[in-house]
Structures are given as structure tokens and as C-alpha cells.
Image: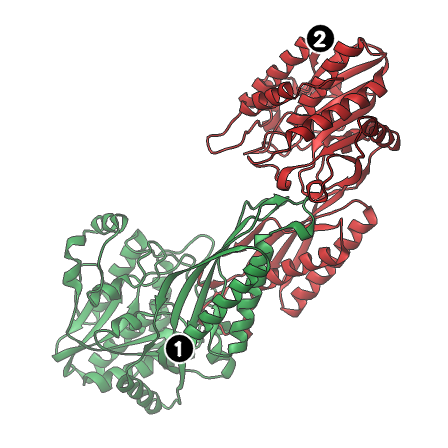
Chain colours: A green, B red
Amino acid sequence: MGIDPALLERRLDELYEIGAEPDGGAYRPLYGPAWATAVERVERWLKDAGLETRRDAVGNLWGRVGGSGKAIVTGSHIDTVRHGGRLDGALGIVAGLTAVEALLRDKGKPKRTLEVVAICEEEGSRFATNFWGSRAITGTIDSVDPEVAAAMRERGLDPARIATAARDDIDTFVELHIEQGAVLESSGTPLAVVTTIVGTAQLEVTVTGQPDHAGTTPMDLRRDALAGAAAMVQAIESIAKSLGKPAVATVGKLAVEPDQSNVVPGMVVFTIDLRHPDLSGRRALEERIRSLCTTISQERRLGIAIRTLQEKPPVAMHPDVRALLARAAKECGVQATEMVSGAGHDAQVLAARCKVGMLFVPSIRGRSHCPDEATDPAHLVLGTQVLTRALHLLAW
Amino acid sequence: MGIDPALLERRLDELYEIGAEPDGGAYRPLYGPAWATAVERVERWLKDAGLETRRDAVGNLWGRVGGSGKAIVTGSHIDTVRHGGRLDGALGIVAGLTAVEALLRDKGKPKRTLEVVAICEEEGSRFATNFWGSRAITGTIDSVDPEVAAAMRERGLDPARIATAARDDIDTFVELHIEQGAVLESSGTPLAVVTTIVGTAQLEVTVTGQPDHAGTTPMDLRRDALAGAAAMVQAIESIAKSLGKPAVATVGKLAVEPDQSNVVPGMVVFTIDLRHPDLSGRRALEERIRSLCTTISQERRLGIAIRTLQEKPPVAMHPDVRALLARAAKECGVQATEMVSGAGHDAQVLAARCKVGMLFVPSIRGRSHCPDEATDPAHLVLGTQVLTRALHLLAW
């Protein structure tokens, strides 16, 4: 099955231009004008490739070529983060479309129903709607924020109809994605089959001390919330390192009160993002972090409150799909490695309703969610070829 | 000399009501309506006490009772920080006025010219004008920000006339102030004579790392600017503690980029406020902090830039005034301690043009710049009595 590298690159370029920001990167927030333009562009490509298109109640775009039985689906999300890169989400859509197009041309109609999906939203970078598209597909949206409902109506979508987007007729979902980290690059591996998408816990820690005058309060009389929080940030890093790979812990957000150069900080609020592919590993990480932060607060006579903002269990990819993707890679002449995904993906939501599997291609210097997100063009072609082979094995 | 405790408290209460904020404290920003009302109130009190009043070109309010020679001056600043307390600045004005009033009543006209001043601004909490009033008195205002000039005009003050506020006819300036720290309270001392106002350096540190995905970037591949900054905050605290009293170092402001819970921080900017009463001590503190922060950045492959935002040398109080204040205290039956001021005060600016001295009374729990700023009423009376005695020794 020949994949035209130039066509792949051209389509990625075209999508990347939609929502281009003056200071770099593209931003296609859910239901915004750039988002709508991008969905239209993909719809035209799908139609040109001979697929029958439709949009569901939340704006997921489906391209279908009929066959029997439950559907084989490929694709990814069409929204981006602010200053997003060229490949996150876009690659899975463009590769899926290009793969199906090549298969239809070379192999004729599939035996199984085959679909390409442009999922409306995964990033949560306009509203706190993460996995909006895949949650609609799995029928797990319980409520709609009024702001989101208004944005839907602006695009002609009826929030009351969200439940109609749910599907129980998908057999398998496969997604090609960039790794978004530097693991493949640093080991010189061109392709990976994902074994598990890590479990995540997001905690919010509030440290309270005593705001005092920076000039008149001797060091030993202070209850400095930032000095305490700094000790906690250090401890969190040490714990994740000492537990070893693949545990990660990140303090990404931190705010100081009153945030004045001449006042000893009275309060600090920070987040902790914890990830581990195995639930007991993630819990051990969280347990140790909670315990050490509490000890530090006691030693420093500081108040502490730790609350869980979000908790997602790890999700294993389906063993049949993993085996199939490994076989497809081998048939394309490449030995794929296996790896854990540290990032979240639609596959982890869809796993509740169908068999799921993912392929990763390397990210240059691990860069993602930024304008210098890039992958060696040869790796893009390789990933698309393996996806094409996998779809052929699944649907013909 | 009898000081009426009730009168002192009533005047402090009256001033505190001017600019009262709904959520606590008072705010009397330079040239604002509350500021203007407070100046009018003090002007009336000065007139009622028999002083001749005038306002200078920046709005400093002077109350004068004629005599010969260069003037003996007492007072403090009338502006407050946001959510400011009842005593910072206000005490020095109210105590000075009450002292002079009692002296005129009991001792008649002074031999020396005696003045009470309500300095228009010291806090810099509306504009970045710190020490605006005392800088005008010492003739050291070089330029006027257009916004400040506009605010002056609204109060009928002509920015072109600022130079006329300069004075070279002040002999001695004495100021009663709250300590704003907990040193006196924790040692059970009711009064202190200030020896030196500390030198301050404010630094801004920019730490640059690499923003990365919090899920896909293993701990060992990160260049986390916040983890590095946290190590620096810890080091800064340790260095100040190990140098011992009276060195203090504070990281009061800290901002993270991009400040997202799922992104490894790419940049952190924080301030360091360093204070020490002796210039070589302050420089040693700064030198060690700069060196350790640089080492931490190198160990963690982070970029670092440290710039000096502000630098003020320590200012010694005049030995004659210190001796006089100690004598006045002794004559009032109290053994005053000596201490360094960790906060800045108008006296440090005025020291360039006249002899200066300061008295401190304890702050309950060291609280200041906040609504619970308070001092035992007996200490307020004691401080005012010692100030009265000192003014008597100086002017009669």
C-alpha cells in the first residue's frame, strides 16, 4: 500500500494553517471559527476519498464506507491547545484518512464497516470539557455547562440531542499519535505500540502560613508558606525520582499570596499531577507525597489542605489490538517497541465501549503542545503505513 | 507632662475611620479622597493646638510654632498600604501632635522652632513613589511620573513647584513608630531606640528550563524551572538562617510559566528581598545567595538571570539623637533597648539633610500592614510620653 509522503505533509500543513496564531502555533478551540473551518476541510477530504460523511450531535465528524458488522474506526481529535503544534490530533486524522483512501484505491470495498473520525474535542483548552467527543461517543456526558451549550448552538448543534451521539456498534478503535515525549527518540526507536495509558491524579495543595513584614520579621519567627511549599516541591520531585520510571510527578501551577516582594508569603496554592501506569504504583506515589507534604507542614507550623481535583485510573489497551498492531508493524518491516502513554488520549475513554489500540511515532526532542512539535517525515510515513496495514488486517 | 490616653486613642480611631475598607483595614493612597480627608483632619487638630499650618508643594502638611534657629521636627506619614492598620504612620503624627499640644499647654512657647509634619507618602502603595514626601523635603525628586503629576493637579498641587518643598532648615527629626515585628514583644521590652535602618537589596531571579508535557516526560529528561526555583528558595532561607540575626532574606513574589497543571514549568520569575543593618553583611548575604542559586541552576541545566531591582544602603540614626532619646526614656522611668529597624522609614531619607532618630513601641504578635495591627494602649502612651520628653529636651 503506497502512502504518498507529500500528500501526508500537505494535508498536515493545510490543517496547521487553520487557526494559526500570530506568535506561533495554531489554536482550534472547540466550536470556534478555526475549529469549524478545520472540520469542513476534513469533511471535504473524506468526501473526496469516497467516504459518506455525517456529524453527530456534539460535532464529531464521521466518514464511513459500508460493510458488515460492527465498525473498525480510526482517527483522532481535531481541536488543539493554545499555541498547539502541527501533529497532536491532526496526525491521527490525516493518517487515518490517507490510509483508508489508499486502501479503497488499492483493495476495493472493505468486508467490515470502516470509519474515520475527527473527534471534536479532547484537550479541554476552551472549556473544561476534556474528552468531550469520546465521552459523547461512549454516552458518558451527564451534564452540559451553559457556556458550552451556547457555543454548541452557535454551531447549529442541539445540546438536548447529545445522547444520540452514543454508539454501541464500534468493534475496534485504532489511533496513530505522536509520543509527545522523548522516550522513543532517546532510544532510537521509530514506532511503539501502546500498552497502557497511565492513571492520573491531580491534587491541589493549599499551604497556609502567616503573612509578615519581610524586613521586621526575624527568620526564626516566620511561618513562610512559600518556603514550606518549596520544600514540598523538592520532596515531590525526589519521591517520583526515587520510585523510578515510569512514575512522574509535576508541580505545574503555583500561586503565592499576597505575592508582594516585601511580604513573607502567607499562602501558597499549587497543583500536583501524578501519573503511573499501574494503579497501585500511582497510589503509592500519592500516599508518599501526601505524607511527606504533611510532615513538612507540621515541622514548619504551617497549615495544609490537600484535595483531589481529578482522578483517572490507568487504561490497558486491548491485547488483541496490541498483537494486531505489532503484527502490522512487523509486516511493514519494523520491530515496534512497547510503551506506556504518559499522556491521556481518546482511546482511554473509548476503551469502555470497544477494543482500543494506539501507535506512537517519535517526537523530536519530545516537544509537544508548542509550535516546535515535530516528527521526522520518515516516521510519519512509517506510522501511517503500519496503520494502513492494521486497518487492512482488521477490515478486509 | 500629662498625655491623655483617651485623646490619643480617639485621634487614632478617627484617622483609622478615614479610608476604612469594607473588608477590613484602611486605605489612604496618596492624593486620593481618603488621603485628602485625613490631611484636613490633622490640619484642624494642628490649628486647634495652636500651630500655624501650611502645605508644601507635594502636600506634606506642616504645623509650626515659632522659635529661633533650625527646626526640631516630629511626625510620620499619613498614607497607608491597602488594608492598612491603625498605627503605621498614624501613630507618629498623632503622638507628635499630642506631645506638642501638651508641651505648649504646660511649658509655653519653645525656644527653638518646633514643627509637626504629616508626610504625604511613604508606602508607595498607589504609585511607585516610595518616600515621596521625604524625598521632596530633601530635594531629591528628579522626575515626576505623568500619572502622579495628574493626581497632584487634582489636589491643586503644581508638579512644577516640587523643588520648593526642599528644606535645609531642619536640625533634628524624631519619629515614634510601631516596630512592625515581634522582637520587642518576644523580649518583653516596651520601647526601643533605633540604631540603624537596614540596607535592602531587591533582586529578581529568572529561571529558565524547558516546558514539557507532565505525562510524557520522564523525571530524568526534565529541565523543570519550578523544581529549580524551589531548590533556590530553600537555599535562600538556609543562607539567611545560617548567617544569623539580623540578616533576613525573603522570596515574596513568584510566578510560573506557563502555570498549567499538566505542563512541566518552563520559566519561573521570583524576587528576593535581602536586609542587613551593615552593608558588608548585606553584601555577604547577597554574594552567597547569588552563588548558590547559580550553582543550583548549573546542576539542573537551567538558565538563570539575576538582576538588582533596588538597592538601599543601611542608614545609621544620629548618635546625638539616639543618646537624647535614651535619656528621655530614662527620665520617663523606662530602660529602652536598642534595635535595628528592618523596615524602611522616612527618617532614612531625611538623614541626608538633618539629624534623625526613631522610637519603636511593640507590635502585638508583630502584625503590621494589616487590620490586626495593634499595640498595647499603655505602650502607646509610654512612647508618646518619651517623645514628649525628647521634644522638650530639644526645643525648650
Using the numbered discs, state the Cα–Cα distance from disc 1 to disc 2 in whole angstroms.
Answer: 80 Å
| Image position of B380 (left or right of A152) | right
Query: How far from the left and from the top, in percent, is residue B362?
Result: 69, 36
Q: Along the line of sight, which residue is nearer the eye, A329 or B57?
A: B57
Residue at position x 56%, y 18% in the image:
B37
At a point 65% along the width and 37% down the height, the residue shown is B363
On screen, residue B359 versus residue A93, left or right, reads right
> SS for tag 1?
helix
| Image-based side of B89 in relation to A36, left or right | right
Q: Chain of mark 1?
A: A
Q: Residues within 10 Å of mark 1 (few under 14, many from 20)?
A: few
The quadrant in which residue B158 appears is top right
Badge 2 density bin: few <14, some 14–19, many ≥20, Cα 10 Å: some
Residue B319 location in percent, x, y?
A: 88, 33
Residue B43 visible? The answer is yes
Q: On residue A280, which mark appears?
A: 1
Q: Check residue B50 in the rendering and tell me which mark sits there, or answer none.
A: 2
Question: Residue A245: where, in percent of width, then height?
Answer: 49, 79
Quadrant of the rendering where the N terminus of chain A is positioned: bottom left
Q: Nearer the viewer, residue B77 or B166?
A: B77
Q: Amino acid at mark 2?
A: Gly
Q: Quadrant of residue A121?
A: bottom left
Q: Amino acid at mark 1?
A: Ser
Q: Toward the viewer: A168 or B51?
A: B51
Q: Is residue B24 above or below residue B307?
A: above
